[in-house]
Image (spheres, rainbow, N blue to C red):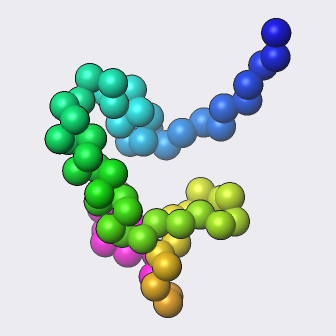
Amino acid sequence: MSVVHRPELDADLRSIVDAWPDLPAVLRAGIVAMVKGAGCQNPTGDSECTSGRAGGHGSDSGMR
């Protein structure tokens, strides 16, 4: 049996992941749309969400 390494998730993200199976489809679609709309990309594999727009960061909104 192989062991899968799963990195520790931020507490807010963990709560979303834990709730995901029980969320109504419309809520899941809304969350996915917000993430895609924010232009979040993670080409470096680090924990920062950088926008596809020049100089933008996903955390610029102050929603922490």
Please state the horizontal and vertical placement of residue 63, each as a whole percent of the image.
30, 62
One can see residue 40 in this view: yes
Q: Which of the 4 quarters of the picture holds residue 14?
A: top left
Is residue 36 covered in magenta? Answer: no
**Residue that appears at 20% across and 41% down:** 27
Residue lying farthest to the top in this orientation: 1
Q: Which of the 4 quarters of the picture holds residue 19?
A: top left
Question: For the magenta stretch, what is the residue range?
Answer: 56-64
Q: Which of the 4 quarters of the picture holds residue 42?
A: bottom right
For the N terminus, the image quarter is: top right
Please state the horizontal and vertical placement of residue 21, each as a whole percent of the image.
33, 24
**Residue that appears at 46% across and 85% down:** 53
Residue lying farthest to the right in this orientation: 1
Please state the horizontal and vertical placement of residue 47, each as a whole percent of the image.
59, 57
Residue lying farthest to the bottom in this orientation: 54
**Residue that appears at 78% across and 19% down:** 3
Left or right of 45? Residue 47 is left
Left or right of 36? Residue 5 is right
Left or right of 51? Residue 2 is right
**Residue that appears at 26% across and 46% down:** 29
Q: Is residue 36 above or below residue 29?
A: below
Q: Nearer the viewer, residue 23 or 25?
A: 25
One can see residue 15 in this view: no
For the C terminus, the image quarter is: bottom left
Q: Nearer the viewer, residue 10 or 37?
A: 37
Left or right of 39? Residue 23 is left
Is residue 58 covered in magenta? Answer: yes
Q: Is residue 39 above or below residue 4?
A: below
Q: Is residue 46 above or below residue 24?
A: below
Please state the horizontal and vertical placement of residue 25, each as a whole percent of the image.
22, 35
